[in-house]
Image: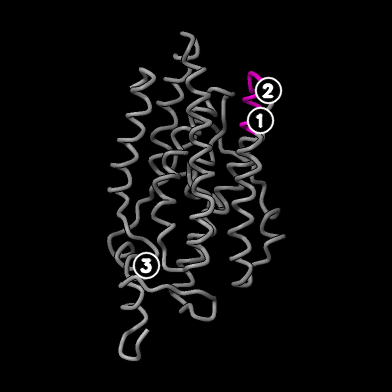
Amino acid sequence: MSDSMTLEDYLAQGGQLTSPGNVPPRYRGELMRIMASFVDSELAGSAGFAGVINDSPGVKQRIAAARIVLEKADHAARVLRIMSEFGVDAEYYAVHHPWAKRLPRDASVDAAREATDMRLPVFHFPFLGWADAVVMNVLMGEAVAVQIGDLSRMSYAPLADVFRTIAPREARHALLGYEGLTQIVATGEGRAAARASIDYWRPRVLMSFGNTSDERLAMLKRFGLRHETPAAQIQRWNAQIDARLASLALA
């Protein structure tokens, strides 16, 4: 960065920061918010899938669910290591909240937003069994792929590196879900259950893209922490989900 260029201009033009010592206060606050939301969501997601491992219909499905539980916890740990460089007690953070806790199934998304941790709204709702969990994993897995693609280009280089590393694993989680859904819809009963779950989870996953104000989004773009608008991400996610569901005659 040249002496004549402001930090904001540097970041807006694709510059990167590499350590907590380089980070100004407002940038730090937004960066911590991104990391906390991701970590809380991964820990809550891991806890949620742990609860349905025993509902899986076979050994292969049990292994897939266990892999998701393990890798989501590992992803949280990787980001927590970066948070610890900003003074967060990572060991305490990982256990300070009951990550398996859920709201009632019929609770409003607004109730999820008012909760004390920063997990995405979708992770506040419980599963009704194996098929329900698989459907949620397919829908949310595609959403994560869209969102993590943007986060992988963020201006805080250590975190961008982590997101690029875990992106293929998160993509595999969605693929495992799609394979499981293919098996579920092979029966009429399974197809009916899948349709009901899609109706339940799709609007809740949609909320995961947020309702960032234009002003705040503009600031995040100037900081290089975001590049895409929620509307653009939602459009891409809808197209991907529609294609997935169409391939299973679930559109």
The extreme bottom residue here reads 3
Label 2 neighbourhood size at 10 Å, few (<14), some (14-19), many (20+)?
few
At 60% from the left and 53% from the top, the residue drawn is 76
Q: Where is residue 108 in the image (x, y as percent from the top left)?
A: 45, 38
Q: Earlier in the sequence, mark 1 or mark 3?
A: 1
Label 1 neighbourhood size at 10 Å, few (<14), some (14-19), many (20+)?
few
Image depth: mark 1 or mark 3 in front: 1
Q: In this view, does 12 lie above or below 81?
A: below
Q: Classify the position of the C terminus by image quarter.
A: top left
**Marks 3/2: CA–CA distance:** 44 Å
**Marks 1/3: CA–CA distance:** 38 Å
Three-letter amino acid code at the position of disc 3: Gly
Q: Classify the position of the N terminus by image quarter.
A: bottom left
Q: Name the residue under label 3.
A: 224
Q: Where is residue 136 in the image (x, y as percent from the top left)?
A: 49, 32
Instruction: Say which mark, if any, is on residue 59.
Output: 2
At 33% from the left and 60% from the top, the residue drawn is 227
Most prominent secondary structure in the magenta stretch? helix
Q: Give the range drawn in magenta.
A: 56-65
Three-letter amino acid code at the position of disc 1: Ile
Which secondary structure lies at badge 3? loop
* Numbered marks: total: 3
Q: Is residue 240 left or right of residue 176?
A: left
Q: Mark 1 points at which residue?
A: 63
Which secondary structure lies at badge 2? helix
Membership of 97 in magenta stretch: no
At 64% from the left and 45% from the top, the residue drawn is 99
Three-letter amino acid code at the position of disc 2: Val
Q: In this view, does 144 lie above or below 135?
A: below
